[in-house]
């Protein structure tokens, strides 16, 4: 149909998709702005204005009128546990974006009533107590009241988990259960577990407990993964680098995305890593992998990118900021063997390293191998997280040709990090500007889904503002980045980590047709509104994989969410709470939530015979 004077006509090499009447940020230094583009065969064939794309519009071309909206290259989360997240997505109740504990508990109560016998209600990451109006965690008592008979598991960051009595029974925790290494089962006066599990400092107790919950059948995992990828597309994500992680075994846990890729059903490009799962067996696993697969195996939709984010378990510094920094035993011998093996076989890797103390020890191993002429040998390698990395370590990373991937973990853990390490350290955590000033590739991501939310705009807001989800500004103005830099960290930098910088991350002729039409202009929207941006139309390789608002119905159809009792079927994923009235209306909203919680607290105290301060009908100041 004619759109704005653009009339389809018979033409050779007609575009599959044309986006016109847009404010396009191309990410291409040679042509930063544009008004239109065309995609054919998955690749961009033209970038310019409406006149440039008009000759490419054929009868079968989908013409998208952006209505003057901002269009950006598709976002790329450089550290996302997307494979694991997809396998469990439809089983999880998401508190991402929920603004009050009162609302969160109401959701939990309703979901418990919908959940069949034998299944659990599980809240697994993406939230922090600081995002709630009440600024606190739920208690085991509140979980017991909300769900007397259905097991409930609530994971809070890498710090703790809260279980109700039914979950304690299902998990087999009793007074006789010993505390696991690196973890603590909180007990009452009689020795019975209260429902609180603490990472002290290792999160293994949290993950191993969650692993006791029922899993989906293989076909259900495929549907779950497709819905999770669509949820990521909702925010303009078109690519992700999967960082592997605990309880993600290769090849069995990779089978779902492999099948979806084979069937052409992935809506997100995934580059994945392999992570040895068994302490003491790491070298055996790595040896088997380097002899059977190679980085780059796959295609533009699913490809192996290397090893990590752990190479050996002993070298992992757990990032529970509620606990002191862990003191690691000697790990260098086995670690060196792992790095040597990977380097000799042309494998790159990524490495979990929170603290500078760990990074310095790792760098010493790399420098030893470099002195032998063995490192990095042309292989891509990077540090993940690096909250407290020093300037000296950054210089050493640069000298060895390394990169960095930073995540907004302190969006969710910033308050506890500041309490432990102080305002000065928090202001530089991580030292993003110092990284960029050294010319290092610095890619951005979330580390979702067990700590941070997968919403990339929350991470972009953190990069720009330095604020937590609770509103605390922790990173200094000197350690924040402008919006164009933040977007580059979420596009071109991530492409560089997978060696795809020539085809991904920019909107340029010959590059992948991956883009997002945004609900709001990232470059002009008020800073506090950045977390509420969504994509109205997401295109991956010329396929429209998400469409909302004016474009609703243009995307590929998905099967219904199953099982029918899934929390996603009732509540969806991330909870957008944007107020049409802006900041003032949002403030009034929050005030109302606090008042409601105050009344509940008053009733709770009164019901237990505790002192209750009587509300005064008049402000005493008025009577002065």
Image (tube, rainbow, N blue to C red):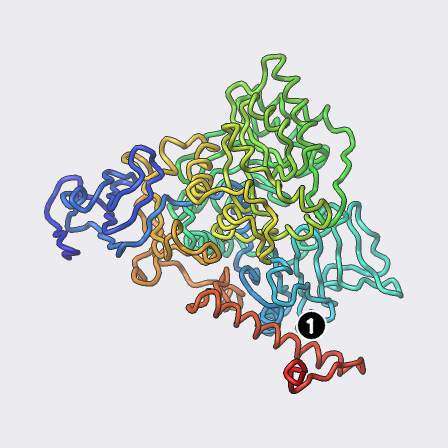
User: Residue at left 21%, top 44%?
Assistant: 49
Q: How crowded is the residue under tag 1: few (<14 C-alpha within 10 Å), some, or many (20+)?
A: some
Task: Farthest residue to the right: give it.
Answer: 190
Find residue 99 and report its horizontal and vertical position in percent. Answer: 56, 65
User: Residue at left 65%, top 58%?
Assistant: 213
The answer to whether residue 173 is above or below residue 459 is below
Q: Secondary structure at mark 1?
A: loop
Name the quarter where the C terminus is drawn.
bottom right
User: Residue at left 66%, top 61%?
Assistant: 154
State the count of labels: 1
Residue that badge 1 annotates: 149
Q: Nearer the viewer, residue 61 or 408?
A: 408
Task: Farthest residue to the top: give it.
Answer: 372
Task: Farthest residue to the left: give it.
Answer: 10
User: Residue at left 60%, top 28%?
Assistant: 394
The answer to whether residue 158 is above or below residue 390 is below
Find residue 435 and report its horizontal and vertical position in percent. Answer: 55, 32
Q: Nearer the viewer, residue 400 or 475?
A: 475
Name the quarter where the N terminus is drawn.
bottom left
Is any part of residue 525 visible from this angle?
A: yes
The answer to which image quadrant residue 309 occupies is top right
Task: Farthest residue to the bottom: give it.
Answer: 617
Horizontal arrangement in the rendering, residue 165 relative to residue 593 (left or right): right
Find residue 158 and report its horizontal and vertical position in percent. Answer: 67, 50
The answer to which image quadrant residue 48 occupies is top left
Find residue 453 and report its horizontal and vertical position in percent. Answer: 55, 53
The answer to which image quadrant residue 389 occupies is top right
Is any part of residue 115 visible from this angle?
A: no
Horizontal arrangement in the rendering, residue 520 relative to residue 403 (left or right): left
Horizontal arrangement in the rendering, residue 554 relative to residue 456 (left or right): left
């Amino acid at each position: 149909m004619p759109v704005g004077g653009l009339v389809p006509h018979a033409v050779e090499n007609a575009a599959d998709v044309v986006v016109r009447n847009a404010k396009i940020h191309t990410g291409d230094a040679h042509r930063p702005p544009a008004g239109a583009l065309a995609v054919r065969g998955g690749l961009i064939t033209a970038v310019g204005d409406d006149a440039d794309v008009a000759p490419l519009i054929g009868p079968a071309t989908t013409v998208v009128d952006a209505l003057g909206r901002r269009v950006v290259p598709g976002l790329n989360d450089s550290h996302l546990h997307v494979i694991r997240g997809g396998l469990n997505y439809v089983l999880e109740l998401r508190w991402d974006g929920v603004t009050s504990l009162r609302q969160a508990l109401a959701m939990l109560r309703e979901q418990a009533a919908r959940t069949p016998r034998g299944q659990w209600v599980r809240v697994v990451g993406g939230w922090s107590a600081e995002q709630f109006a009440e600024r606190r965690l739920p208690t085991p008592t509140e979980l017991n009241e909300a769900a007397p008979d259905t097991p409930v598991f609530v994971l809070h960051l890498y710090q703790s988990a809260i279980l109700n009595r039914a979950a304690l029974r299902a998990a087999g925790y009793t007074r006789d259960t010993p505390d696991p290494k690196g973890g603590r089962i909180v007990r009452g006066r009689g020795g019975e577990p209260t429902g609180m599990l603490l990472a002290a400092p290792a999160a293994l107790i949290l993950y191993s407990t969650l692993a006791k919950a029922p899993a989906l059948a293989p076909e259900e995992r495929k549907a779950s993964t497709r819905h999770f990828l669509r949820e990521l597309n909702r925010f303009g994500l078109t690519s992700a680098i999967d960082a592997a992680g605990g309880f993600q075994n290769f090849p069995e846990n990779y089978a779902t995305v492999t099948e979806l890729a084979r069937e052409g059903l992935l809506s997100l490009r995934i580059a994945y890593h392999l992570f040895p799962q068994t302490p003491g067996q790491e070298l055996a696993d790595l040896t088997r992998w380097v002899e059977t697969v190679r980085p780059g195996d796959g295609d533009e939709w699913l490809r192996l990118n290397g090893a990590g984010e752990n190479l050996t378990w002993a070298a992992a510094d757990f990032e529970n900021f509620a606990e002191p920094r862990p003191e690691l035993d000697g790990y260098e011998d086995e670690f060196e063997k792992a790095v040597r093996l990977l380097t000799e076989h042309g494998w790159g890797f990524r490495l979990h390293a929170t603290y500078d103390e760990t990074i310095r020890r790792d760098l010493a191993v790399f420098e030893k191998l470099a002195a032998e002429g063995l490192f990095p040998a042309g292989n891509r390698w990077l540090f993940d997280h690096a909250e407290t990395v020093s300037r000296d370590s950054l210089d050493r990373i640069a000298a060895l040709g390394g990169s960095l991937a930073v995540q907004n973990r302190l969006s969710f853990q910033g308050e506890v990090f500041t309490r432990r390490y102080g305002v000065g350290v928090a202001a530089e955590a991580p030292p993003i500007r110092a990284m960029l000033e050294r010319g290092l590739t610095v890619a951005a991501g979330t580390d979702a889904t067990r700590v941070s939310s997968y919403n990339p705009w929350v991470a972009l807001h953190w990069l720009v503002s330095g604020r937590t989800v609770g509103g605390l500004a922790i990173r200094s103005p000197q350690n924040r980045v402008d919006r164009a830099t933040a977007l580059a960290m979420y596009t071109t930098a991530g492409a560089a980590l997978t060696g795809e910088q020539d085809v991904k991350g920019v909107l340029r002729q010959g590059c992948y047709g991956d883009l997002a039409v945004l609900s709001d202009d990232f470059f002009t929207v008020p800073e506090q509104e950045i977390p509420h941006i969504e994509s109205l139309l997401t295109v991956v390789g010329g396929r429209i994989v998400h469409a909302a608002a004016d474009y609703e119905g243009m995307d590929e159809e998905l099967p219904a969410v199953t099982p029918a009792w899934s929390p996603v079927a009732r509540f969806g994923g991330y909870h957008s709470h944007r107020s049409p009235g802006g900041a003032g209306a949002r403030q009034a909203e929050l005030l109302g939530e606090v008042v409601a919680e105050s009344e509940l607290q008053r009733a709770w105290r009164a019901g237990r015979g505790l002192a209750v301060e009587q509300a005064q009908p008049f402000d005493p100041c008025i009577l002065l």
